Image (tube, rainbow, N blue to C red):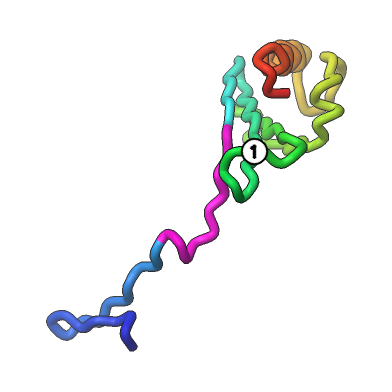
Amino acid sequence: MRDRIKIDGVWYVRDKEMSDLLVTKTQEYLYEAEGYEFKFIKIYKDDGVTFYNGPSLDITNHTTKESQYWDNDEYLRDYVAKECLFLTKEAALELESFLDWLKDKGEL
């Protein structure tokens, strides 16, 4: 009962401390193209300095509200704009440009 307190007849529960919560540290790059959002995500290891292998890409179509989650870093590294039922041709080219930018920055 230590985590509860009664004030003016109303019981309140103490909020959890941040150390009690499972929090994941990430590094993200967000690129918005016409009708799409591309979010490149890298997850830090527990040391908070190095990353786990295998970044991911979260793609959202703003028109249909559909999204896809890609987590194959080899596929992302070798991606070339091609037909994809989920992406328009223009969006596929935008994605290719974004991934090339990430490679140039040493992020992919």
Residue 33 position, x and y percent, is 61, 16
Indicate whether residue 16 is drawn in magenta. no
**Residue at the far left in the pictured view:** 8
Where is residue 79, by image quadrant? Answer: top right
| Residue at image location 86% in from the left, 16% down from the top | 82
Provide the residue designation for mark 1.
50
- Quadrant containing the N terminus is bottom left
Quick one: 55 or 33, which is closer to the camera? 55
Where is residue 87, by image quadrant? Answer: top right
State whether residue 42 is above or below residue 33.
below
Residue 48 position, x and y percent, is 57, 43
Residue 28 position, x and y percent, is 58, 31
Residue 103 position, x and y percent, is 72, 16
Range shown magenta = 18-27
State whether residue 94 is above or below residue 4.
above
Q: Is residue 91 visible?
A: no
